[in-house]
Amino acid sequence: MDTTPLLLQLPPGAAPDSIVERLPVHDLLNRLPPRRRAVLVLRYVCDLSIEQTARALGCSTGTVKSQSARALATLRTHAARAGL
């Protein structure tokens, strides 16, 4: 079993340099509270629907939407401050 964190795994055929491009995103995600990070990872990394994410986290679809919006706003703020 591969124990490399999900966001650091290279997709098949990806250039090794592509991992360097993901490190800032990984750092930004780590700044989020766990619940908001989980929502973003499930929605945008695992490509789950809002409904699937809500089921996986045991919450309502409204919670997924609001947590996604707040997490993305936080990421945008942190990215702008970091000059990304």
Image: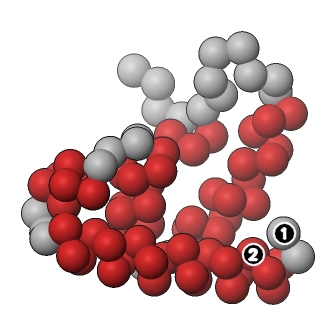
Looking at the picture, tell me which residue is in the foreground, 34 or 72: 72
Please state if 3 lies on the left or on the right of 63 as rendered.
Answer: right
Mark 2 is on which residue type? Answer: Ala
Mark 1 is on which residue type? Answer: Leu
Can you say whether 50 is above or below 68 in the image?
Answer: above
Dots 1, 2 in contact, CB < 8 A: yes
- Callout 2: 10 Å neighbours few (<14), some, many (20+)? some
Where disc 1 sits, the SS reads: loop
Can you say whether 15 is above or below 54 in the image?
Answer: above
- Residue in the picture at 86% in, 33% down: 17
Can you say whether 69 is above or below 4 in the image?
Answer: below
Quadrant assignment, res 65:
bottom left
- Callout 1: 10 Å neighbours few (<14), some, many (20+)? few
Please state if 5 lies on the left or on the right of 39 as rendered.
Answer: right
- Residue in the picture at 56% in, 68% down: 30
Mark 2 highlights which residue?
A: 79
Residue 63 at x, y percent in the picture: 23, 76
Q: Quick one: quadrant of the C terminus?
A: bottom right
Q: Which mark is residue 84?
A: 1
Looking at the picture, tell me which residue is in the foreground, 64 or 17: 64
Residue 46 at x, y percent in the picture: 40, 41
- Residue in the picture at 13% in, 55% down: 55
Residue 57 at x, y percent in the picture: 19, 60
Disc on the earlier residue, 1 or 2: 2
Q: Which mark is residue 47?
A: none
Residue 77 at x, y percent in the picture: 69, 85
